[in-house]
Image: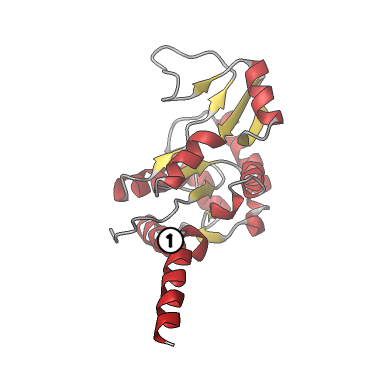
Amino acid sequence: MTDMSNRRGLLVILSSPSGAGKSTLARRLMEWDPGLSFSVSATTRAPRTGEEHGREYYFLSEDEFKRMAANGEMLEHAHVFGNFYGSPQAPVQKVIESGNDVLFDVDWQGEQQIRNSNLGKHALSIFILPPSITELHRRLVSRAQDSEEVISKRMLKSWDEISHWGAYDYVLVNDDLDATEKELKTIITAERMRREQQPMLQEHVRTLHAEFEEMS
């Protein structure tokens, strides 16, 4: 990995319909760079056996969650099956200020909320498309994890997700997993060099200006 000390981290958003390969690509990215971590979400649901506060989720009361959301302390949030889920801003901000990136697995609505948040200027959004609808269906079936009914529901939902591809910074067609992984790494490496991600540049330019003035 290139030495990127003193940089500010990115909020890397990955979205895709189920079966497009997002989870595998996310796992490979984290193996590539151990400094890249998944955002830990907050939820109002009760902890399940073996889950710990701050590891799987931040477990909050509904009142606490609503207060944080109302105060702008959630980068994104949603109400799903009777519970609230969201991404607290404070821990994410701490990570990116340390120079590490945070990975988000959210849908297009979550992407828009993060983009419009206080940390939106540090967001990098990438949408993963399948090579075809037929291939998407084949991948869902080959996983052998869901019933035909569940697969049908996932397929119906997939087009709604795909229809928002134009809102993303980058869009990749995952017809070859290794090639897509390489493209993702290239994108992230380049985006880390954005001016906004290198706060030390302003001080460096001031130093150059002072040096120029001394020579004048």
Q: Quadrant of residue 35?
A: top left
Q: Is residue 68 left or right of residue 18?
A: right
Please tell me which residue lies in front, 210 or 143. Answer: 210
Please give the name of the residue rendered at 48% of the width and 65% of the height, measured from the top-left corner. Answer: 202
The percent position of residue 7, horizontal first and vertical second, equals: 41, 56
Q: Which amino acid, mark 1?
A: Met
The percent position of residue 216, horizontal first and vertical second, equals: 44, 88
Please tell me which residue lies in front, 64 or 211. Answer: 211
Please give the name of the residue rendered at 45% of the width and 71% of the height, measured from the top-left corner. Answer: 205
The percent position of residue 49, horizontal first and vertical second, equals: 42, 11
Q: How is the image coloured?
A: secondary structure
Secondary element under disc 1, as helix, strand or loop, is helix
Q: How many marks?
A: 1
The percent position of residue 59, horizontal first and vertical second, equals: 53, 19
Q: Is residue 153 above or below residue 115?
A: above
Quadrant in which the N terminus is drawn: bottom left
Q: Is residue 42 above or below residue 195?
A: above
Q: Residues within 10 Å of mark 1 (few under 14, many from 20)?
A: some
Q: Is residue 4 left or right of residue 62?
A: left
Q: Which residue is mark 1?
A: 200
Q: Is residue 137 above or below residue 203?
A: above
Q: Quadrant of residue 83?
A: top right
Please give the name of the residue rendered at 42% of the width and 17% of the height, measured from the top-left corner. Answer: 51
Visible in this render: residue 194? no
Please tell me which residue lies in front, 9 or 180. Answer: 9
The outermost residue toward the bottom is: 216
Visible in this render: residue 46? yes
